[in-house]
Image (cartoon, rainbow, N blue to C red):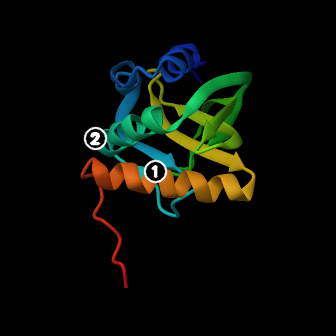
Amino acid sequence: MTSADPSAFRAAAESGDVEALSRLFTDDIRLYSPVKFTPFEGKPLVVGLFHVLVRTFEDFRYIGRFDGSAQTTGDGTDTPSAILLFRTTVNGKEIHGIDMLQFDPAGLIKEITVMVRPQSAVQTLGEAILAGLVADGLVPAPDPR
């Protein structure tokens, strides 16, 4: 099994460099978000989501890292993985979270799982992300009914 280094992802995420992040993803990347039941799938949608996130997060920073391996949800294979702990603020709410990155044999990121707390931050984050995705034309506006 290849070991994968999340340092390039960390640097790009902390600096808001979405183009650099894009080069680290497989074409069929999946991102599991705490604000949506089904994953964001495919590089165009995941990159679009990161454009929204870099505009939404205030004072985003990683504060820790754990390395290991885990099964992906996509195909159940055991893969090199890294967990990066982060802190950020969205609309005045402090968010604590983790990004779990899972890598393919070439060292590209094939799956990201994001978890955040507390529950009120999840709701605030979900509203901000939806507004950004709608504004960027990545998802339709919700039906007001």
Compared across the picture, whether 100 is left or right of 39 comes to right
Residue at 48 percent across and 39 percent down: it is: 56
Residue at 54 percent across and 35 percent down: it is: 57
Res 5 visible: no
Residue at 36 percent across and 79 percent down: it is: 144
Secondary structure beneath disc 2?
A: helix
Comparing 57 with 7, the one in front is: 57
Which amino acid, mark 2?
Answer: Pro
Marking on residue 44:
2
The quarter of the rendered structure image containing the N terminus is: top right
Residue 100 quadrant: top right
Q: Residue furthest front?
A: 92
Residue at 37 percent across and 32 percent down: it is: 26
Res 132 visible: yes
Give coordinates of residue 133: x percent, y percent.
Answer: 35, 51
Picture layout, residue 13 above or below residue 52: above
Compared across the picture, whether 33 is left or right of 22 comes to right
Q: Residue furthest left?
A: 137
Structural crowding at the residue carrying mark 1, measured as other residues with C-alpha within 10 Å and reported as few (<14), some (14–19) or many (≥20): many
Picture layout, residue 137 above or below residue 12: below
Marking on residue 5:
none
Residue with the mark numbered 1? 129
